[in-house]
Image (cartoon, rainbow, N blue to C red):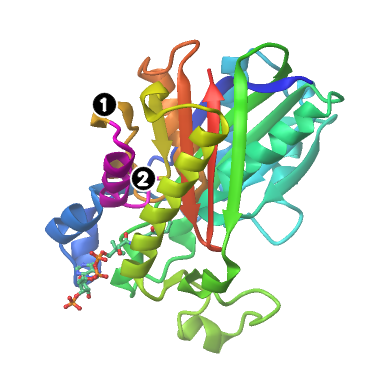
């Protein structure tokens, strides 16, 4: 059975920077509160003209170049996002057209901040079938388009960006060793965008009441669940592969809050130099955060052939997930 190996990474963030100082001018918050409670100093923000597929396209081009592939080589395109360009066609189809990847099938994956790891599981499963060769997986989000700028509990947290990987079916010991996916739909209302779908179609009243925007009912509760869930997902993955935490060369966690990342790292017993952190520059970019951090680690020369990478995600759904990769 072939395994799925990442043969190229790429990322892209829009040029516009929104600092904590900018937010201080917009609402009752402070740079000090945001930095100490979340670790975020600034985030990137799309312009009115930029959509999720525009970010996905740039990240995809970079990942394809790193992999040495043409769009025509792709069999499948997956885009993990909760901020698609539109309901349908999927952002993956928009991207397929933009890339000119005419041979590729395309679909979106919706698992909020866990979307990239969910997408890895889908790609891994498809490549293991043995009938496909190359898959492009992109995590791309424009969360600044769906935050309520009057809600300081949420709007300071999120940012825009995209990260992409090209996966290839390969023989041998390297590649994705495992993926584990989890969900607890009963806790979905803790972190949601209630309006805009078939339950509450868009109306002026809905917009006025802030229902067509991200809502988090109890950030503190979500925080505690995230720490426990990410630790559990990591331990489940290690146990499944008969590995110890000492075997891990790099942890690439979802970037929701620096305090969550630090708590997960400490509970697992990982030293800080083995944990990827870039939340200070991007905020929480949901499905884009893991591939953005992974690409940054690649560019910084932190990932070497044979390294063991542990990816852990947590987000709306609620969903959480882990993946182990032998690079
Ligand atoms: O992406 C995956 C899912 N998302 C997450 O994992 C996010 C998880 N949650 C968190 O990261 C944290 O809970 C937050 C960063 C959202 C909040 O941090 P916290 O330490 O849990 O703060 P809190 O919600 O307990 O609020 C503390 C205080 C409150 O004031 P009072 O009631 O104590 O007077 C808030 O009103 O901080 C206040 N506050 C703010 N103050 C200044 C909340 N947001 C802000 C803000 N600026 N932006």
Which residue is depicted at the point 45% across and 48% down?
Answer: 232
Q: Secondary structure at mark 2?
A: loop
Query: From this viewpoint, which residue is outermost toward the bottom?
Result: 205
Closer to the N terminus: mark 2 or mark 1?
2
Up-down relation of residue 1 to residue 198 (above or below)? above
Which SS does the magenta portion mostly show?
A: helix
Which residue is depicted at the point 64% across and 12% down?
Answer: 68
Q: Is residue 78 magenta?
A: no
**In the rendered image, which residue does mark 1 sit on?**
273
* Res. 20 visible in picture: yes
* Res. 163 visible in picture: no
Quarter occupied by the N terminus? top right
Does residue 169 appear left or right of residue 84 in this picture?
right
Q: Residues within 10 Å of mark 1 (few under 14, many from 20)?
A: few
Quarter residue 167 falls in: top right
Q: Residues within 10 Å of mark 2 (few under 14, many from 20)?
A: few
Q: Please give the label number shown on residue 196.
A: none
Of the four image quadrants, the one with ligand 1 is: bottom left
Q: Nearer the viewer, residue 244 or 37?
A: 244
Up-down relation of residue 241 to residue 26 (above or below)? above
Q: Position of residue 277 (x, y in %)?
A: 31, 36
Q: Secondary structure at mark 1?
A: helix
Q: Please give the label number shown on residue 16.
A: 2
Q: Position of residue 211 (x, y in %)?
A: 50, 79
State the CA–CA distance, disc 2 to disc 1.
29 Å
Q: Is residue 257 magenta?
A: yes
Does residue 169 appear left or right of residue 313 in this picture?
right
Q: Position of residue 296 (x, y in %)?
A: 40, 27
Magenta segment? 255-270
């Amino acid at each position: 059975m072939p395994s799925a190996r990442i043969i190229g990474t790429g990322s892209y963030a829009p040029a516009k920077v929104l600092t904590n100082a900018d937010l201080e001018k917009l609402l009752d918050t402070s740079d000090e509160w945001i930095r100490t409670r979340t670790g975020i100093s600034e985030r990137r923000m799309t312009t009115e003209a930029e959509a999720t597929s525009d970010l996905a396209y740039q990240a995809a081009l970079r990942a394809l170049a790193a992999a040495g592939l043409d769009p025509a080589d792709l069999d499948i395109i997956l885009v993990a996002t909760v901020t698609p360009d539109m309901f349908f066609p999927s952002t993956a189809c928009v991207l397929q057209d933009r890339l000119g990847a005419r041979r590729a099938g395309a679909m979106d994956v919706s698992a909020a901040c866990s979307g990239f790891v969910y997408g890895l599981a889908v790609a891994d499963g498809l490549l293991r079938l043995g009938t496909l060769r190359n898959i492009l997986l992109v995590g791309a989000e424009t969360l600044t388009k769906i935050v309520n700028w009057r809600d300081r509990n949420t709007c300071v947290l999120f940012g825009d960006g995209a990260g992409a990987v090209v996966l290839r079916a390969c023989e041998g010991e390297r590649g994705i060793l495992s993926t584990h996916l989890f969900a607890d739909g009963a806790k979905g209302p803790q972190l949601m965008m209630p309006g805009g779908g078939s339950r509450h179609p868009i109306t002026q009243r809905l917009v006025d009441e802030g229902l067509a925007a991200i809502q988090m009912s109890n950030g503190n509760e979500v925080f505690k669940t995230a720490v426990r869930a990410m630790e559990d997902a990591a331990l489940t993955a290690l146990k499944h592969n008969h590995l110890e935490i000492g075997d891990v060369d790099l942890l690439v966690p979802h970037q929701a809050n620096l305090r969550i990342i630090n708590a997960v790292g400490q509970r697992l017993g990982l030293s800080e130099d083995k944990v990827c952190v870039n939340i200070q520059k991007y905020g929480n970019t949901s499905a884009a955060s893991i591939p953005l951090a992974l690409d940054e680690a690649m560019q910084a020369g932190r990932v070497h052939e044979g390294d063991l990478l542990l990816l852990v995600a947590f987000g709306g759904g609620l969903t959480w997930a882990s993946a182990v990769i032998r690079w």
